[in-house]
Image (spheres, coloured by chain):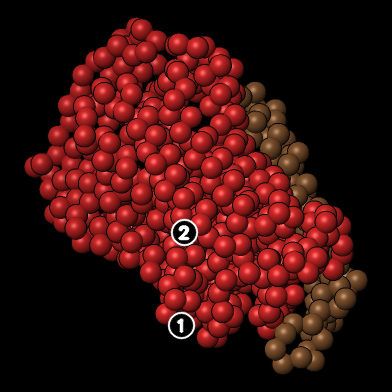
Chain colours: A brown, B red
């Protein structure tokens, strides 16, 4: 299972990049240039606050998965033991 | 034993009531947005409109995570009890003051500016409250009852919505419409301070969380919770896991069941607003006890699989449920009583001093459904004004549904609320158990507010975008396309949750 967790890391990195691309081109940028006040605020929030959180977080999550940081050692009956 | 039990329920009561009041305060602003905008954000004024948009978006999306960081840090440094008393007072004070601010007519731009500042303080307080209440209750609860005890906190967002609607309805009904629009809308804001004082007095007499008190006495609390939570890889990876493996899915399922469903009934299905409020109310009341049931069940069979099952069922069921909802009131499938149909047309002056032809079209159907369409055609020199080769028209359809359809829709919304309770009921205990005492408040608050504020808060905008695009593209099932957002986010969360979360850990005294 630890191998699956590691391989899935590639998916999370790819997903982060896809969200960055589509989030900016489809949702963020059109709002920034629409000329409407509501859209401008929403566009700024998407591009400068939401996308960095989502994309950055998912990229780091994927990177950690690829580095085996989420490996679980199933050696205790009553508590979770992740790689330390 | 009985003393211990009663004190535990006092703790749950005091924590839950305080959190419920914070949700109440947060919701009344949204529920009274129309009247607030006329008082503080005059139409046609771009600066006021800008401040209004900031107040709407910033409080929900941006400030809540900052509140989580600010108060989470305080909670891990000073203690849970004092911190969530501060969030309560901050929220109550800000809400009360919103009800006291003179209108735009009296003090000009100070009015919207003050409203914006107070709304931001509300968002900040809300960001700090949930983590404190959940941590405080969990750290008092025995391990085998933690899910059930913290699930009371999980009911507060829904109950806060009920109470806000009840207070607003009560105030409206106790005075004329003019009086309510003039000053009566301030009453629900003032009422908040009474509830806050009562809750403050109850919370004031409570003890600090025993687990935190022991850690503090032993000098095991963190000196820099932010650095430890997000600067140390071992802790930060759990913050990311909490966000992507649980809370982001919970956020979109919560928003879909409680808010998207309501918006779909009102705007896509065109059901009368009063009927929508009524059926949402019933579905939410029916669903609320299930927060407790799934919280209790999570103590028996584990948190992870209940939350994952809730996400999986929601992913599979959303499209069939919304298709069934849409078809329940689709008049194309109903038999019209043709002799009851009528069209009445009048010409009226519009706000641009031009003329509109307004047609009121009414239809009745054999199953009791009533259809009313108000169609406005803008005129130019006595004939329909043409825009892009088509007459410029606006149409507003309202359906009054029969009792059978109403109960079908209540059932379909209730199912969605059930999914909400599956993912949301156990999540407080799950988050508490994920992090050690010294950084618990900080570490669990941030993913919670990003998951709900960002992923959940984005739902209306993204879903509307998807549905509008599908409609423009001629998709016959355009009304279902908005659901791809919660389905997609929940599916990613489900995969991460299944593969990466290990739910064995029930120890919280570390």
Q: Residue shown at 70%/28% (left/top)?
A: A33
Distance CA(mark 1)–CA(mark 2): 20 Å
Relative depth, front residue between B78 and B507: B78
Q: Which chain carries label 2?
A: B
> Disc 1 on helix, strand or loop?
loop
In which quadrant is the C terminus of chain B drawn? Answer: bottom right
**Residue ID for mark 1:** B1
The answer to which of marks 1 and 2 sits earlier in the sequence is 1
The residue at the far right in this view is: A67
Q: In this view, does B86 lie above or below B215?
A: above
The answer to whether one can see residue B347 in this image is yes
The answer to whether one can see residue B457 in this image is no
> Disc 2 on helix, strand or loop?
helix
**Residue ID for mark 2:** B14
Q: Is residue B207 above or below residue A74?
A: above
Relative depth, front residue between B305 and B439: B439
Report whether B24 appears left or right of B444. left
């Amino acid at each position: 299972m630890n191998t699956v967790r590691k391989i899935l890391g590639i998916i999370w990195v790819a997903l982060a990049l896809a969200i960055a691309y589509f989030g900016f081109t489809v949702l963020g940028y059109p709002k920034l240039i629409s000329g409407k006040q509501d859209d401008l605020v929403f566009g700024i929030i998407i591009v400068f606050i939401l996308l960095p959180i989502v994309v950055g977080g998912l990229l780091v999550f994927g990177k950690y998965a690829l580095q085996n940081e989420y490996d679980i050692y199933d050696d205790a009956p009553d508590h979770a033991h992740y790689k330390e | 034993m009985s003393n211990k039990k009663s004190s535990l329920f006092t703790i749950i009561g005091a924590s839950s009531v305080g959190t419920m009041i914070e949700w109440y305060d947060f919701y009344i602003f949204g529920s009274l947005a129309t009247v607030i905008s006329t008082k503080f954000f005059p139409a046609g004024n771009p600066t006021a409109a800008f401040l209004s948009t900031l107040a709407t978006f910033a409080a929900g999306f941006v400030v809540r995570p900052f509140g989580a960081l600010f108060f989470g840090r305080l909670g891990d440094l000073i203690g849970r009890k004092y911190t969530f008393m501060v969030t309560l007072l901050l929220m109550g004070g800000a809400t009360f003051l919103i009800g006291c601010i003179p209108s735009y007519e009296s003090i000009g731009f100070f009015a919207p500016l003050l409203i914006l500042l107070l709304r931001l303080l509300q968002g900040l307080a809300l960001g700090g409250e949930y983590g404190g209440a959940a941590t405080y209750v969990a750290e008092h609860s025995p391990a085998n009852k933690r899910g059930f005890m913290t699930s009371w906190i999980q009911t507060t967002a829904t109950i806060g919505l009920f109470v806000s609607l009840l207070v607003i309805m009560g105030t409206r009904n106790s005075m004329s419409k003019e009086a309510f629009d003039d000053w009566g809308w301030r009453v629900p804001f003032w009422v908040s301070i009474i509830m806050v004082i009562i809750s403050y007095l109850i919370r004031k007499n409570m003890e600090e969380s025993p687990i935190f008190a022991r850690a503090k006495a032993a000098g095991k609390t963190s000196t820099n919770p932010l650095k430890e939570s997000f600067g140390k890889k071992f802790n930060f990876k759990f913050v990311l896991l909490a966000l992507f493996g649980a809370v982001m899915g919970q956020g979109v399922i919560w928003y879909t069941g409680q808010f998207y469903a309501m918006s779909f009934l009102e705007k896509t299905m065109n059901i009368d607003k009063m009927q929508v409020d009524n059926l949402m109310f019933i579905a939410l009341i029916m669903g609320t006890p299930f927060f407790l049931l799934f919280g209790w069940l999570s103590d028996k069979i584990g948190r992870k699989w209940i939350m994952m099952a809730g996400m999986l069922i929601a992913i599979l069921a959303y499209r069939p449920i919304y298709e069934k909802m849409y078809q329940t009131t689709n008049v194309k499938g109903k038999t019209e009583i043709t002799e009851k149909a009528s069209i009445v047309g009048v010409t009226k002056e519009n706000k641009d001093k031009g003329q509109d032809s307004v047609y009121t079209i009414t239809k009745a159907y054999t199953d009791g459904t009533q259809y009313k369409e108000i169609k406005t055609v803008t005129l130019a020199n006595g004939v329909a004004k043409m825009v892009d080769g088509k007459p410029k028209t606006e149409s507003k359809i309202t359906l009054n549904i029969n009792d059978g359809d109403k109960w079908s829709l209540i059932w379909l919304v209730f199912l969605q609320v059930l999914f909400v309770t599956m993912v949301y009921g156990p999540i407080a205990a799950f988050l508490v158990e994920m992090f050690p005492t010294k950084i618990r408040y900080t570490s669990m608050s941030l993913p919670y507010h990003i998951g709900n504020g960002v992923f959940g808060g984005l739902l209306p905008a993204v879903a509307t975008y998807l549905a509008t695009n599908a409609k423009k593209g001629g998709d016959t099932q355009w009304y279902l396309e908005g659901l791809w957002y919660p389905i997609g986010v929940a599916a990613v969360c489900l995969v991460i949750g299944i593969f990466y979360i290990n739910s064995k850990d029930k120890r919280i005294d570390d």
